Image (tube, helix red, strand yellow):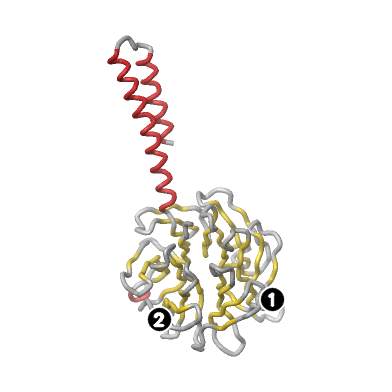
Amino acid sequence: MIEKYIFCKIQNIIKRHSMKIQNLEHLKIVFILNFILYSSVALCQVSDKSKSISHTIAYGSKGICLTNVEGTSEVRLTNGDHGYPAWSPDGKQIAFYSYHDEKKTWSIHTVNSDGTNRKRLTYAKDKWDSTPSWSADGKKILFAREYRNSEGIKKYEIWIMNSDGSQEKQIKLLVGGNCSFTPDGRIVYSAEFKDKKSEICIADIDGKNITQLTHNNTNAWHPKVSPDGKQIAYSSDKDGTRKIYVMDIDGSNQKRLTNTRSGGPSWSPDGSQIIFQSKGEGGNGKSNVYIINKDGSSLRKITSQGGWQVAWYRRP
């Protein structure tokens, strides 16, 4: 650490001068060096802390990466086929999914926000676990599970477990995926129906009191509720290709924000902006992370080397 280096260097100088203190001038030198020493250490500590808390946007890019909102600095936490990062409420951990068994199995993992202490939480073979979401108290993780049964029929399930991976439990009343917790502890998800497209629904944590929010007979995915609980950002192909939309929590006032193919929205901590993934104009090349105001103004590209499946940490 740079502060340790500064501390040792200045402390050695102080020791050399302390041996020679014979008059007021030498005493002044020692006093000034002590002041520089502790000021430098404090400044370094503040700089390190400021850098760590500024990297609040997590995304997938051949692993899990972090960046600041300006996109000027990237920190890589993991390497591999990893995606759908989700911040814990205290910002200390990130949940994500990873491939196993030649991509036949997807499992939920966690890693500290400094890249240490990676843990695998789910072990269901030949099943695809994804879109983890933390409860407000950080004790539970919600996730989607998809697989084909013995008859080859695709199954869409929503599960919940403790944040250490224990006590996995299926919420049997819910059929769908792309699930996440709302600020008040309910579940918003993309429901799968036998006879129509995916639609956004909201339900209690036990799967009861299901309310369908979209009725467009077109696909709608990845719903995320705003920090104040009043709006939902999501992606939908109701205008032909997948784009970002917002609507009120009751499903009213649906509004399209983007004009290019885009998906996977996540709200800013104050609810004024939304980040998402897009290939930009033309829809060719790599997906990157973009940011836009919730009214559709001030679109800006954050990453340039690839990025998808985004999550913005909501600092308390």
Coordinates of residue 27 in the picture (x, y in percent) = 32, 16
Coordinates of residue 257 in the picture (x, y in percent) = 37, 77
199 or 41: nearer the viewer: 41
- Residue furthest to the top: 22
Instruction: Answer above or below: position of 183 versus 43.
Output: below
Residue sitting at x 54%, y 58%:
89
Quadrant housing residue 181: bottom right
What mark, if any, has residue 3 been given in the picture?
A: none
Instruction: Answer above or below: position of 56 versus 214.
Output: above
- Residue furthest to the left: 25
Number of residues whose C-alpha sits closer than 10 Å to that of mark 2, classed few (under 14), some (14–19) or many (20 or more): some
Quadrant housing residue 209: bottom right
Tell me the distance, in whole angstroms, between the alpha carbons under discs 1 and 2: 32 Å
What residue is shown with label 2?
A: 255
The amino acid type found where label 1 is placed reads Lys
- Residue 120 visible in image: yes
Q: Secondary structure at mark 2?
A: strand
The amino acid type found where label 2 is placed reads Lys
What residue is shown with label 1?
A: 172
Coordinates of residue 63 in the picture (x, y in percent) = 50, 58
Number of residues whose C-alpha sits closer than 10 Å to that of mark 1, classed few (under 14), some (14–19) or many (20 or more): few
Residue 107 placement, left or right of 61 = right
281 or 222: nearer the viewer: 222
Residue sitting at x 63%, y 57%:
120
Residue 188 placement, left or right of 230 = right
299 or 237: nearer the viewer: 299
Residue sitting at x 52%, y 65%:
84
- Residue 287 visible in image: no
38 or 306: nearer the viewer: 38
Q: Which quadrant is the N terminus positioned in?
A: top left
